[in-house]
Image: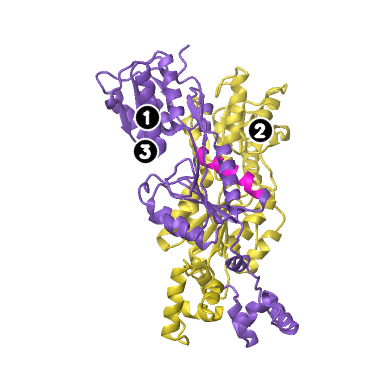
Chain colours: A purple, B yellow
Amino acid sequence: MSKKTTIYDIAKELNITAATVSRALNNNPKISAKTKELVFETAKKMHYEQNKLALALKSGKSFNVGVIVPRIDSNFFSSVIRGIEEELYPEGYHVIICQTHDQQELEIKNINSLLNAQVDGVLMSVSNANIEKLDGFKSLLKKNVPLIFFDRKKNIKNVSTITIDDYKGAYDATKHLIDQGCKRIAHLSNNRKLEIFKNRYLGYKQAIIDSGLTFDENLVVESFSKVLEGRKQTKLFLEMDNRPDAIFSSSDFTALGAIQEITSYGLRIPEDISVVGFSNEPFTKFMELSITSVDQSPREMGRIAAQIFLEEVNNDAKVKSEKHVVLSPELKIRKSSQKF
Amino acid sequence: MSKKTTIYDIAKELNITAATVSRALNNNPKISAKTKELVFETAKKMHYEQNKLALALKSGKSFNVGVIVPRIDSNFFSSVIRGIEEELYPEGYHVIICQTHDQQELEIKNINSLLNAQVDGVLMSVSNANIEKLDGFKSLLKKNVPLIFFDRKKNIKNVSTITIDDYKGAYDATKHLIDQGCKRIAHLSNNRKLEIFKNRYLGYKQAIIDSGLTFDENLVVESFSKVLEGRKQTKLFLEMDNRPDAIFSSSDFTALGAIQEITSYGLRIPEDISVVGFSNEPFTKFMELSITSVDQSPREMGRIAAQIFLEEVNNDAKVKSEKHVVLSPELKIRKSSQKF
């Protein structure tokens, strides 16, 4: 790769200082018209394009916004991103995406890369891995780059968040299973150090208690949001002496794994075991045995996250404030849990 | 948002020139140790972090690589990106993703945003929309930023490509349907100005001709790669007097739409109508009526695209060369087409 032309190359070519080239390109009045013309012609000849970024270094604006998500191949996150784009494009902003694969190391690298790319803000859903540590965020906060968390958040002063009411989503889902006659409802949870999974667990637990059923901690397991993990954990449930008659999963992917495992045991869904997922991924609707799931309005979430960013970036006030928006989820009842 | 601290702010604070600040930060020997210390201390106090990007402006390296795809919410593209990341992370590169939604305007904006973010290269699958125009690419090529096309490409001198043999994928898929006894095979195509769809069409056509069946242009329609589009076009096939006994779709999403429409007519798959898709999206395997599809080894494609980038970026030779890698696709035979 040949190097990009820089102001230093132009300076060398013209035997003047880089500072003079820079001033000429920035139309500094101290530079003569003749020099400016010479610099512009040389810059053009050498395919130098005055970089918006170099200007950004001075103005503090690049009109690029960074979005960091655990994974792009989930409909939930790609829909949030769509919502963000819909809101930001008309305002002249461009969206750059990075994924963390739930690895803390990548999360920090993402933040640094986006800072180096001079983004005007970062909209982010944190990874499973980086729950208690805040180090990675310090560089962002120090630089006064607006940071907004969506869905998976950390509690940081002055940082706005947009989440859904996971507690309510889980409560409604579990209540629905109880209304369908289920009495022993297992829960496929995930890392409960992450608030969303903790709240789904708490909503599930409270619905059981409120209905007068016995809450059994043995029916709660943690697993990653993967189809195969769902199969593995469900196998353990099915091997129990007193196996559950329903599974409420904190993820559609583990719910799909549960369905595959239950079917491989020759058991019927929902007659023998009912299954409910979380996120309303499109496949839950496509499947012949469609899966009941909790819709999280991801597009709306993205739009609101973007609106909060715009408010922050356009706010010149020195006083900082934070905003916390909580969306209400909607249960989509389908074949995997509807007995009548 | 308060402005980011720049060398100009530090210069003002210390009442010295920005050039001096810059030289001090870059450890220029012409600057005294005392001044350097003063500049470093002030920079630290003002939360200035010497930007890797500012250095990149000089060195021509940011270690960010841009990836542009039509959409992130397809398993094919997210798997290619995974492959690119797997290959580039160990080399110290970071991956920034943009999506075009098949809109030409966004494609050009993506390129410009990535250039402004000082990426060291762009790995890209072109949008449907921007097939004949090359304007958007000129800025990239002029700046000598390596450009590599994967899957959907344009033919540009000195630009390397990695694709799969779409012709063979389509030929094999169609041949399989013929081997299963299908005689009137329809084709859900897409914009054939794009080479991948043209080649799938040609492979399909040739397999029919080679098998001595009659090729009927009326059985070929173009549609976008969306479930509902697949339903709409399939409805037209089903309303024909002499309806097809198989559908080969250039997309898994339209194949899914075809299946939904065929089922809604009370017809059986594969007995009445067989269906084959293209891309091997995970849902094709998950579905109870699993869908036969053509696997494109997306992860491998991503890894190879990244390897080509690394070769180009590490090549100091003035002589440019281009590389064209073509992967061989693999037909995954499943329930939607397997009669015996």
Labels 1 and 2 share a subunit: no
Q: In which quarter of the image is residue B143?
A: bottom right
Vertical placement of residue A226 versus B314, above or below: above
Instruction: Give the class, few, some or many, for how many residues have Cα within 10 Å of label 3's Cα (few <14, many ≥20).
Output: some
Where A93 falls versus A16 (above or below)? Answer: above
Task: Please name the amino acid that badge 3 sits on.
Answer: Phe
Do tags 2 and 3 sit on the same chain? no
Observer-side mark, 1 or 3, equals 1
Q: Are marks 2 and 3 in contact (CB under 8 Å)?
A: no
The kind of residue tagged 1 is Leu
Where in the figure is residue A47, as x and y percent of width and height?
66, 73
Reading the chain from its start, which is encountered first: label 1 or label 3? Answer: 1
For label 1, the crowd category at 10 Å Cα-Cα, with few meaning under 14, some 14 to 19 and many 20 or more, is: some
Q: Where is residue B52 in the image (x, y as percent from the top left)?
A: 48, 68
Which residues are drawn in magenta? A76-89
Task: Compute the Cα span from label 1 to label 3.
Answer: 18 Å
Q: What element carries label 2?
A: helix
User: Could you say where residue B78 lies in the image, as x and y percent from the top left?
Assistant: 51, 46
Q: Quadrant of residue A196?
A: top left
Q: Name the residue under label 3.
A: A224
Q: Mark 2 highlights which residue?
A: B229
In screen coordinates, is A208 left or right of A332?
left
Do the CB atoms of the residues marked 1 and 2 lie less than 8 Å apart?
A: no
- Name, please, the residue furthest toward the top: A340
Q: Nearer the viewer, residue A227 or B160?
A: A227
Q: Name the residue under label 1.
A: A202
